[in-house]
Image (cartoon, grey):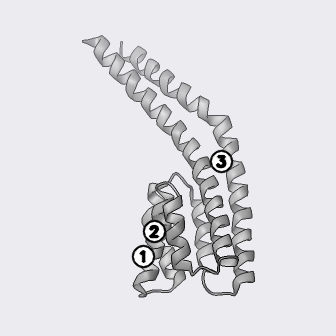
């Protein structure tokens, strides 16, 4: 009976270590996807002269979850017509952000980006998109560094913590 308990403890802590390492990987992946989404948005607005609602809907179909939900929610809020682009973006961010692996710094960057949406002409909007992408690149570099530094450690720490707890209980 003790062995079953010991195995359960080790499995639980190992799982938590792997989950923490997965979050590090997901953050990097989602930042990369967010940068690509902004590049696509820039192309849709600048070269396709696509309205913001249509461009967001297209992006939601190209992205994987949970980032696709952000653009889908944004497009639906714009479609209702009850709020401006800034309000729709901010509400969509608040709805979807807790489902992402992204951090508070990225939230602030995207919130600031939303304050410029739909308020300026194409060239100024393009500059804001590029500025946001520069900020996201910096965050992605930080995320990649943390992933490389801590991913393997989190996995090992999960296993070793389980073994330590079992040894203390025996």
Which residue appears farthest toward the left when viewing the image? 1
Quick one: 63 or 113, which is closer to the camera?
A: 63
Residue marked by disc 2? 72
Quick one: 84 or 3, which is closer to the camera?
A: 84
Residue marked by disc 3? 143
Residue marked by disc 1? 76
Q: Residue at x 45, y 63 (%)?
A: 69
Mark 3 or mark 2, which has the lower sequence index? 2
SS type, badge 2: helix
Q: In the picture, residue 6 is in which quadrant?
A: top left
Residue 10 appears at what percent x and percent y? Answer: 40, 22
Please state if 4 lies on the left or on the right of 52 as rendered. Answer: left
Residue 28 appears at what percent x and percent y? Answer: 62, 48
Q: Nearer the viewer, mark 3 or mark 2?
A: 2
Q: In the picture, residue 170 is in which quadrant?
A: top left
The answer to whether the residues at label 3 and label 2 have Cβ atoms under 8 Å apart is no
Q: Which mark is residue 30?
A: none
Mark 1 or mark 3, which has the lower sequence index? 1
Q: Residue at x 43, y 78 (%)?
A: 77
* 159 vs 145: above or below: above
Answer few, some or many: residues within 10 Å of disc 3's Cα (few below 14, many 20 plus, some between 14 and 19): many
SS type, badge 3: helix
**Distance Cα–Cα, label 1 vs label 3:** 31 Å
């Amino acid at each position: 009976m003790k062995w079953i308990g010991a195995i359960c403890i080790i499995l639980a802590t190992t799982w938590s270590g792997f989950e923490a390492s997965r979050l590090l990987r997901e953050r990097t992946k989602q930042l990369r996807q967010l940068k690509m989404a902004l590049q696509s948005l820039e192309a849709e607005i600048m070269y396709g002269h696509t309205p913001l609602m249509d461009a967001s809907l297209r992006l939601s179909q190209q992205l994987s979850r949970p980032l696709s939900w952000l653009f889908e929610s944004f497009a639906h809020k714009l479609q209702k017509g009850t709020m401006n682009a800034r309000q729709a973006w901010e509400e969509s961010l608040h709805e979807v952000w807790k489902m992402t692996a992204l951090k508070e710094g990225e939230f602030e960057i995207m919130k600031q980006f939303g304050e410029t949406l739909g308020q300026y002409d194409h060239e100024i909007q393009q500059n804001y998109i590029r500025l946001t992408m520069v900020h996201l690149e910096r965050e992605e570099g930080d995320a990649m560094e943390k992933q490389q530094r801590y991913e393997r450690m989190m996995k090992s720490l999960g296993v070793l913590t389980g073994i330590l707890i079992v040894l203390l209980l025996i």
